[in-house]
């Protein structure tokens, strides 16, 4: 009963916050008679992390290029609720822009779960970003799926290769047997770890440090920069350089809001988002490289770093392949077509 009351309170709080934010969002006429825009941009990360710094740079560029006509306030994670709360705010118009991880929309846009498939993309991060930039499967067909829920993806981009951390080495699928693995809210991510024999648990990252510390979960996956910056390595004995996946983020905008903007403002937004693609890639590459060194040189909280061999990664890849059939069964014919088209695009790019 107490749990239900807490959930009810969270729902009511999110609804009230949405109403307040919608009311606060404004467009007004400046002193020169030109319309000015005041918008909100919410991210899933905090200051110093890739998403927040990306959003801040995008906001600054739009402000400068519009001669102050566009003003965007950037919110870090936690300021407007959990990752799921933030998606709901975007849909309702409580915020105009958001960086969204498909893993937190998997129960809504099931096709977006394809990003959870292990060993789908290549080992070449620059090539992966090129695929994300140019893919018709993603930028046309998957985007249409999100737009049905009032979410318009403007760009898909990577925050780097995913790695595992754990309270024990994870170098073979059998090492995951009974392992309590933290995941995002996605049936496919759960199934991906069940394929290794793990016991996956959905959890917001805001609860993750304490949950790792107390043994509620035993491990997690994230890019290196996030592992170090969120201090997960402090409560994990091992980090596996597994590169089993890439972390994909989406720069999104409320569909109805965007459709109501003047065409020149729409063009300016799209142009600036396109400019940010190489900027985002450079950000994640630099942060992942620098913070790997920080983990390696941390004597206070030593973490054993294990780089999986090609043979070890191949064993995981083989174990993960049946999850693609689960994806197709769950999402249906449209999802199957999107996945097959994306696989063809990846193979062609290689």
Image (cartoon, rainbow, N blue to C red):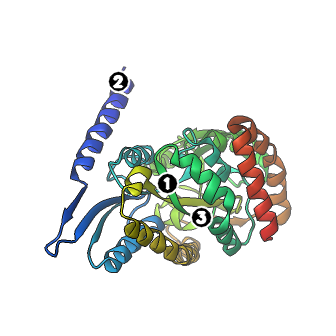
Of residues 125 and 161, the one drawn nearer to the viewer in this rendering? 125
Mark closer to the observer (3, 2): 2
Q: Which residue is mark 3?
A: 303
Give the answer, above or below, for where 49 lies relative to 85.
below
State the image coordinates of residue 231 (x, y, percent, origin top left): 48, 61
Q: Is residue 48 visible?
A: no
Asked where in the image residue 63 lies, by quadrant, the reply is bottom left
Residue shown at 37%/55% (left/top)? 260
Earlier sequence position, callout 2 versus callout 1: 2
**Other-residue count near label 3 (Cα within 10 Å), few / some / many at <14 / 14–19 / ≥20:** many
Can you name the residue that lies furthest to the top here? 1
Q: Secondary structure at mark 2?
A: helix
Tell how many labels: 3
Of residues 124 and 18, the one drawn nearer to the viewer in this rendering? 18
**Other-residue count near label 1 (Cα within 10 Å), few / some / many at <14 / 14–19 / ≥20:** many
- Is 340 displayed left or right of 54 in the figure? right
State the image coordinates of residue 84 (x, y, percent, origin top left): 45, 44
Earlier sequence position, callout 3 versus callout 1: 1
Earlier sequence position, callout 3 versus callout 2: 2
Q: Is residue 59 visible?
A: yes
Q: CA distance from mark 2 to mark 1?
A: 37 Å
State the image coordinates of residue 257 (x, y, percent, origin top left): 37, 53
Asked where in the image residue 14 lies, by quadrant, the reply is top left
- Is 96 displayed left or right of 326 in the figure? left
Contact, mark 3 vs mark 1 (Cβ under 8 Å): no
Residue shown at 73%/39% (left/top)? 333
Q: Which mark is residue 152?
A: 1
- Is 287 displayed left or right of 79 in the figure? right
State the image coordinates of residue 312 (x, y, percent, origin top left): 82, 59
Q: Secondary structure at mark 1?
A: strand
Q: Which residue is mark 2?
A: 2
């Amino acid at each position: 009963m107490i749990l239900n009351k807490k959930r009810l309170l969270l729902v009511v709080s999110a609804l009230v916050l949405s109403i307040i934010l919608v009311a606060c969002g404004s467009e007004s006429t400046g002193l020169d008679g030109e319309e000015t825009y005041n918008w909100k941009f919410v991210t899933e990360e905090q200051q110093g992390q890739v998403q927040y710094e990306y959003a801040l740079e995008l906001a600054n560029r739009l402000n400068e290029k519009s001669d102050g006509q566009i003003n965007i306030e950037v919110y870090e994670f936690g300021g407007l609720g959990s990752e799921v709360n933030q998606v709901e705010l975007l849909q309702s118009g409580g915020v105009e822009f958001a960086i969204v991880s498909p893993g937190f929309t998997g129960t809504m846009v099931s096709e977006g779960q394809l990003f959870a498939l292990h060993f789908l993309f290549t080992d070449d991060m620059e090539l992966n970003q090129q695929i994300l930039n140019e893919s018709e499967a993603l930028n046309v067909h998957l985007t249409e799926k999100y737009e049905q829920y009032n979410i318009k993806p403007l760009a898909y981009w990577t925050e780097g290769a995913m790695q595992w951390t754990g309270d024990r080495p994870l170098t073979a699928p059998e090492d995951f047997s009974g392992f309590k693995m933290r995941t995002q809210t996605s049936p496919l991510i759960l199934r991906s770890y069940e394929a290794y024999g793990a016991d996956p648990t959905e959890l917001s990252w805001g609860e993750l440090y304490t949950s790792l510390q107390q043994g509620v979960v035993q491990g997690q996956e994230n890019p290196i920069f996030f592992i170090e910056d969120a201090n997960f390595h402090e409560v994990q004995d091992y980090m596996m350089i597994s590169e089993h996946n890439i972390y994909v983020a989406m720069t999104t905008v409320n569909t109805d809001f965007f459709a109501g903007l003047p065409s020149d403002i729409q063009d300016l937004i799209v142009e600036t988002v396109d400019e940010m693609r190489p900027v985002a890639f450079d950000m994640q590459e630099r942060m992942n490289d620098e913070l790997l060194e920080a983990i390696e040189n941390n004597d206070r909280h030593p973490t054993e770093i294990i780089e999986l061999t090609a043979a070890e990664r191949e064993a995981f890849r083989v174990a993960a392949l049946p999850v693609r059939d689960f994806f197709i069964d769950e999402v249906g014919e449209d999802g199957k077509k999107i996945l097959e088209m994306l696989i063809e695009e990846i193979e062609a790019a290689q």
